[in-house]
């Protein structure tokens, strides 16, 4: 599939640049926009790698749902997205972790790639057959997972809410409430 | 350099960038975004493997990873909102209530 090298190279460069943007930009709202570009470029990479179903899922779930959720949360945060400058030890830890990850992954994945399959069937029908055949249990388990995630999100949010104060019923005066008509 | 090596190297670099960013950032939402980058890198490797082997099962697994990423984002963002409702600065280092 070396005739796909140039489009893959363009997609990889956009993905890497936007990932660096997410990491290096100070304001989280710009990070979210860079994450949007990142997820769209990855959808393009998936499409070039003939994974149409995953590309559509990436656009729908990632760009459409997760990044929008991030944007909502950034605007809901008290400071709107101001972030303190990273401490020196954090930068050092990040650089060391990145180098260690590069070395470890390079050593693990550097053994070479098996020859590419000449014939393949990665159509939506084939993916659906795999999803509802050998992976049926995992597919069905995503439903309770999402339900638990929704309930957990609501519970975590509600726990920090101040309890409504139960006050005694207000003393009613003798006069009945007047009905006011709005025109 | 073949296309597969290019995509694999990109995925490795993306994973390292995401890991470094999750450590460098102090904003919880920015940290979650870096974790999402790491998940995306893993998904890219899965899709590349599906293409190299010519198997559709791996693509289905990539779809399930997408759903997992959505669930993780929901929980993480709810935690971030709950932690930083009454704070003035969004700094993960000041969140020390979870000591038991």
Image (cartoon, coloured by chain):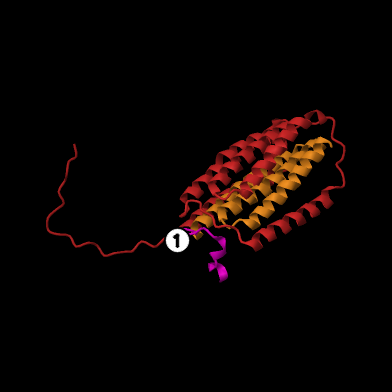
Chain colours: A red, B orange
Residue A20, given in percent of the width and then of the height, sits at 66, 46
Instruction: Report the residue that reaches farthest toward the top.
Output: A3
**Mark 1: secondary structure:** loop
Q: A84 or B20: which is nearer to us?
A: A84
In the picture, measured across the screen, residue A65 lies left or right of residue A44, that is left
Task: Please state, as top left, top right, bottom left or bottom right, where the C terminus of chain A lies in the image.
Answer: top left
Q: Residue at x 72, y 42 (%)?
A: B44
The percent coordinates of residue B63 (x first, y second) are 67, 41
Q: Is residue A144 left or right of residue A168?
A: right
Q: Magenta segment: does it hold A72?
A: no
Part of the protein shown in magenta: B84-100
Compared with A173, B8 (above or below) is: above
| Horizontal arrangement in the rendering, residue B63 relative to residue B8 (left or right) | left
Q: Is residue A148 above or below residue B95?
A: above
Looking at the image, residue B27 sits to the left or right of residue A133; the answer is left
**Residue closest to the eye, A131 or B41:** B41
The quadrant of the picture occupied by the N terminus of chain A is: top right
Q: Is residue B89 magenta?
A: yes
Is disc 1 surrounded by few (<14), some (14 to 19) or many (20+) residues within 10 Å? few
Q: Is the magenta region chiefly helix, strand or loop?
A: loop
Residue A132 in view here: no
Please give the count of numbered marks on the rendered protein. Answer: 1
Q: Chain of mark 1?
A: B
Image coordinates of residue A112 in percent, x first then y, are 87, 44
Q: Residue at x 56, y 52 (%)?
A: B29
Measuring 72% from the left and 34% from the top, which residue is drawn there? A10
List x then y, in percent, for residue B10. Answer: 75, 43
The residue shown at (55%, 49%) is: A28
Residue furthest toward the left?
A175
Q: Would residue A86 be seen by someone viewing this image from the given angle?
A: yes
Q: Which residue is mark 1?
A: B86
């Amino acid at each position: 599939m070396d005739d796909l090298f140039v489009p893959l190279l363009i997609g990889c460069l956009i993905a890497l640049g936007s990932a660096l943007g997410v990491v290096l930009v100070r304001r989280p709202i710009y990070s979210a926009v860079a994450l949007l570009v990142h997820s769209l470029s990855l959808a393009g990479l998936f499409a070039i790698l003939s994974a149409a179903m995953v590309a559509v899922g990436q656009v729908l779930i990632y760009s459409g749902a997760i990044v929008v959720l991030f944007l909502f949360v950034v605007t809901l945060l008290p400071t709107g997205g101001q972030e303190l400058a990273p401490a020196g030890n954090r930068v050092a830890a990040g650089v060391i972790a990145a180098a260690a990850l590069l070395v470890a992954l390079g050593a693990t994945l550097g053994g070479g790639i098996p020859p590419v399959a000449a014939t393949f069937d990665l159509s939506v029908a084939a993916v659906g057959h795999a999803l509802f055949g050998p992976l049926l249990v995992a597919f069905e388990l995503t439903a309770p997972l999402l339900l638990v995630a929704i309930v957990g999100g609501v519970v975590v949010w509600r726990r920090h809410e101040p309890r409504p104060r139960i006050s005694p019923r207000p003393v009613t005066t003798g006069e009945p409430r007047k009905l006011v008509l709005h025109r | 350099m073949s296309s597969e090596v290019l995509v694999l190297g990109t995925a490795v670099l993306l994973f390292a960038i995401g890991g470094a960013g999750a450590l460098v950032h102090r904003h919880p939402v920015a940290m979650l975004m870096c974790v999402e980058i790491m998940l995306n890198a893993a998904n890219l490797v899965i899709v590349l493997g599906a293409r190299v082997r010519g198997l559709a099962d791996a693509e289905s697994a990539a779809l399930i990873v997408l759903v997992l990423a959505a669930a993780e984002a929901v929980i993480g963002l709810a935690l971030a909102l709950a932690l930083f409702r009454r704070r003035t600065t969004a700094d993960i280092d000041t969140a020390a209530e979870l000591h038991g």
